[in-house]
Image (cartoon, helix red, strand yellow):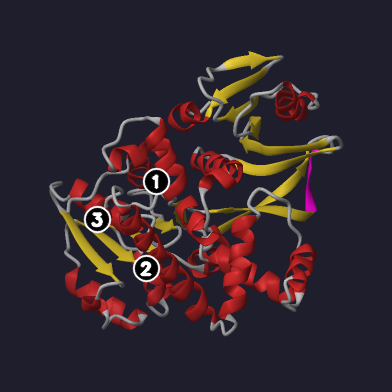
Amino acid sequence: MKPITRQYYADKVDAWIGKGQIIVLTGQRRVGKSYILKDFIERHKDTPNNNFIYIDKERKKFDAITNYEQLNSYIDERLVNGVHNFILIDEVQEIDGWEKSLRSYRLEDDIDIIITGSNSKMLSSELSTLIGGRYQEIYIQSLSYQEFMMFHNLDDSDDTLWMYLNYGGLPGLKQIGIDDEEFVWDYIKGVHSTVVLKDIIERQNIRNVTFLNTLLRYFADTIGKLSSLNNISKFMKSQGVEIAVKSIASYLEYFKNAYLLSSVERYDIHGKKLLESNEKYYFGDIGLRNLIAGGERDRDIEKVIENIVYQQLIRMGYIVNVGQLKAGEVDFVCTKPNERLYVQVAYIIATPETMEREFGALDCINDNYPKYVISMTPLVKRSDRNGITHIGLREFLKKGF
């Protein structure tokens, strides 16, 4: 099947071609990194003097490439002099010592390298050690709402938004289809099993799988709530599970390294500094979160919306923190170079009390940066209340701010 171009990522990849950087596509398994590689080939295959060397470590035909010496041999046999060679490797972390090989090929003329990876060896801190500073990391997320509509040929509607909030944005659902809910959840279960097994249990040699699943369920139930390792330990103890704080910290890092979870630090808005204790956690794909949490979405819709807004803000290029005020909390403080804005997320604002709660926290911020409330309030139109802009969720997911 011909890959669907995800234009946002296609543009980012193309922009780094020819700049002497190894392009690294990171992100959770099954969010579409492989298809971005295939789409790159599809988009550039008719350009004269391009030669593609493609390795997919999830396919058995490449099982013989297990270390950097074998990788060197495979590439050398396929390099063509006098043309532009592209080395593309999917799930490169499955090849021992891959960095030794690619550091060398990066120095050659007329070679560009694009690789993907799904675990801790592909985090920024590790990449800096493995391949130095000559790389560009592009974080791949599951589908945005706009992409979800494009992949499934859907119009913007309440039903479409509900499916997105419920099923999430795993691109592989394109092949499964989303008409049969049982098939959808079977596919999501398969992705969950693959991520947990390959990138956590096997890689970290986990023995206490029961606790792993219990802890992951805890994070699914508490997205959008401040958590500390001590509080998690106390909760587990109340459930009859004795586990050391140090062990919880290790498991949490495993989840983050597999891109299942992201942590969001607190930011003191008045003191203008990051706070060290307590963080919030959000899932990389809301469909996986909903699978783990179980139940119906009407019971936890506010958590789901907050997770969706967080992921969209990351997609828009913001660094996101939780805003801390003396009088309360602001869901998100979003920054870019020379830009800052504040975001509060709500389900439905239907009463004066809800209005005061959601807008009141933003009223307490005494600066002139933009402030927004995002909600699913029916028939809401972009409006202004004392300098705070109210936006409907669908409008935000389609158009941003």
Of pointers 2 and 1, the one earlier in the residue sequence: 2
Against 85, residue 224 (above or below) is above
Question: For residue 377, what is the image quadrant?
Answer: top right
Examine the structure image and report whether residue 232 is included in the region drawn in magenta: no
Instruction: Kindly identify the amino acid type of the residue bearing the numbered disc 1.
Output: Leu
Q: Amino acid at mark 3?
A: Lys
- List the residue tagged with mark 2: 91
Q: Residues within 10 Å of mark 3 (few under 14, many from 20)?
A: some
Secondary element type, mark 1:
loop
> Residue 292: x, y in percent?
52, 61
Report whether 205 appears left or right of 324: left
Question: What residue is drawn where x is 35% and y is 53%?
Answer: 181
User: Would residue 332 appear left or right of 125 to someone viewing this image?
Assistant: right
The answer to whether the residues at label 2 and label 1 have Cβ atoms under 8 Å apart is: no
Picture quadrant where residue 147 is located: top left
* Label 3 to label 1: alpha-carbon separation: 17 Å
Residue span colored magenta: 272-276
| Looking at the image, residue 361 lies above or below residue 143 | above
Contact (Cβ within 8 Å) of mark 3 with mark 1: no
Q: What residue does disc 1 label?
A: 143
Q: Is residue 133 visible?
A: yes
Residue 268: x and y in percent read 80, 41
Q: Which mark, residue 38? A: 3
